Amino acid sequence: MFQYEFMVNAFEAAGIVAVVSGLVGFFLVMRGQTFAGHALSHIGFAGATGAGLIGLAPLWGLVGFTLAAGIAMGVLSERISNRDVAIGVVLALALGFGLLFLHYYTSFATQATALLFGNVLAVDQPTIVTLAALGAVTLIALGAIMRPLIFASLQPELAEAKGVPLRFISTAFLAIVALAVSACAQIVGVLLVFTLMVGPPAAAQRLTSGLWSGLALAAFLALAEAWLGITTAFHTDWPVSFCIALLSGVVYFACLAVPATRAPSGAR
Amino acid sequence: MKAVELGHATLEIGGRSVLSDVSFAIEAGEFIGVLGPNGAGKTTLMRAILGLLSPRAGTLRVFGRAPLRGDPAIGYLPQVRTVLPDLRVRGLDFIGSSLHGEGWGLPSLSASDRHMIEDTLESVGARDLARRPLSDMSGGERQRLLLAQALLGSLKLLLLDEPLISLDQRHQEVVIDVVRKACRERKITVLFSAHELNQLLGTLDRVLYLGNGKAALGTVDEVVTAPVLSQLYGTEINVLRADGHIFVMSRGHDVEHADHLHDHNGHHHHH
């Protein structure tokens, strides 16, 4: 299947995005902010369709809107980002605006499905370069704040006392999530970013309790699910995003069934 | 050298005055039991000492200086402990996250950090917690993990906010014992807040009672008396002593015990 250029492109793009999604998603799951990540992707939909309306590339509308929304959520942190209701209202509003923008820019409608459910088989070389750059920025930023991010996620009260700027960390992290969501939406669409950002990290956290092993496993699972999903789609003619979503779900529920690893008593 | 010194200090949260015009001084190396009804300002006082909140009026000095946020010489066990459900992080990584957790970049744990954490866990009788994920630990085990974490490093001051909550009697004794040793052997000043005075009677040097916006610091005999406590609780208090125990009673009820049950209903506590 690698004789087709679009398959090579799809593997490259999905590979980049899967690793970034798995690593960023690990912290999203650790912080219990998966719903906020979901909302960011919906806001990105409005951004992408809005960008189409004014003649910009959808990706930049996606990046711009999710980044602005991520930073806004972080700044309003206590009031918004951990409140399911507020997030739910905002994401419904964002989808509504997305629909409005589509309504006024009808020739864009064909791309709507691609935005919502992804179209990795249509990724071209320039997009891969953009995704690689986006991914690199995301991972460098994540690496820069990883130490205080973990401390602030696990023990916010103590982290605050030790001088960690909680609000800055939470804002920076949501901005990082926004970038990862934008990249992820290119592959599986805004509605299915959970398949790569939440499924693999959640499964990884079921399987291991170490930090580095968890991160590595999250990235590996995301990569494996993305590539295996594309391969399955190639051979079955099912939509790629469905195959990835299916694998993500199957792996997660299989990991739920695995009994939690418990150190034998007396062992050290 | 005074470890903590308040001079006519007023502490407020959200415009509400919690302690007003309070003055006292804690000597370096003292073990202070911090008591008082809920909302009396035990947590607020600790947050002020940590530099998270400035006095509205008056002065607060910690080892002769204004409180410094993030002071590495202060160990802290917060009362509100956010423990995310279903978090499968090992005890070692959990404590490790707090070590140099205020720096930037990728987290790292050197071999000596690892040994230090394991030794400290051993001292609270919880060495096996290093390898167990947080989600598998009982409330008491998490509590001991947090205590071990608070004891790490070269400390001058240790702030423990209700460290006995959700521990059974045996582990409460372990905690008090470990903290007493740290206080005596490492010459650490300890502020230990609790609901129950009796468990700390054999250990504390002096008691700091907070209530009604006021504070009283002194020996148990000086502070735990009907006139002083009646003023702090704002109601008539009787103090009964029996069999080496002290009971603080209001209209026939044991106020400490009542507080206790009200605050953490469902948990069983021993005397």
Image: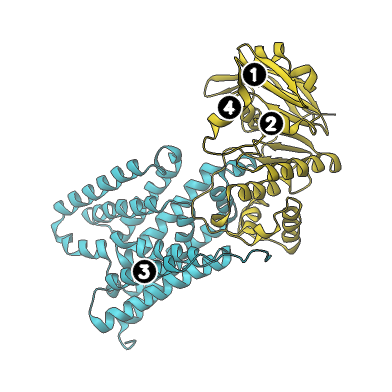
Chain colours: A cyan, B yellow
Residue beneath disc 4 = B259
Q: Nearer the viewer, mark 3 or mark 4?
A: 4
Marks 2 and 3, Cα distance to the nearest angstrom? 48 Å
Q: Is residue B23 above or below residue B86?
A: above
Residue at x 31% of width, y 74% of height: A124
Q: Earlier in the sequence, mark 4 or mark 1?
A: 1
Residue beneath disc 1 = B249
Residue beneath disc 3 = A248
**What subunit carries mark 2?**
B
Mark 2, Cα crowd under 10 Å, few <14 / some 14-19 / many 20+, is many
Q: Looking at numbered disc 2 in the image, what kind of residue is underneath it?
A: Ile
Marks 2 and 1, Cα distance to the nearest angstrom? 31 Å
Q: Nearer the viewer, residue A145 or A136?
A: A145
Q: Quadrant of residue B150?
A: top right
Q: Nearer the viewer, mark 2 or mark 1?
A: 1
Do discs 2 and 3 belong to a common subunit? no
Q: Nearer the viewer, residue B159 or A89?
A: B159
Q: Nearer the viewer, mark 4 or mark 1?
A: 1
Mark 3, Cα crowd under 10 Å, few <14 / some 14-19 / many 20+, is many
**What subunit carries mark 4?**
B
Q: Looking at numbered disc 1 in the image, what kind of residue is underneath it?
A: Met
Mark 1, Cα crowd under 10 Å, few <14 / some 14-19 / many 20+, is some
Marks 3 and 4, Cα distance to the nearest angstrom? 49 Å
Tag 2's secondary structure? helix
Do discs 4 and 2 belong to a common subunit? yes
**What subunit carries mark 3?**
A
Instruction: Tell me whether the residue at label 4 lies in contact with that at label 2, contact meaning CB atoms closer than 8 angstroms.
Output: no
| Mark sitting on residue B114 | none
Q: Nearer the viewer, mark 4 or mark 2?
A: 4
Q: Earlier in the sequence, mark 2 or mark 1?
A: 2
| Mark sitting on residue B49 | 2
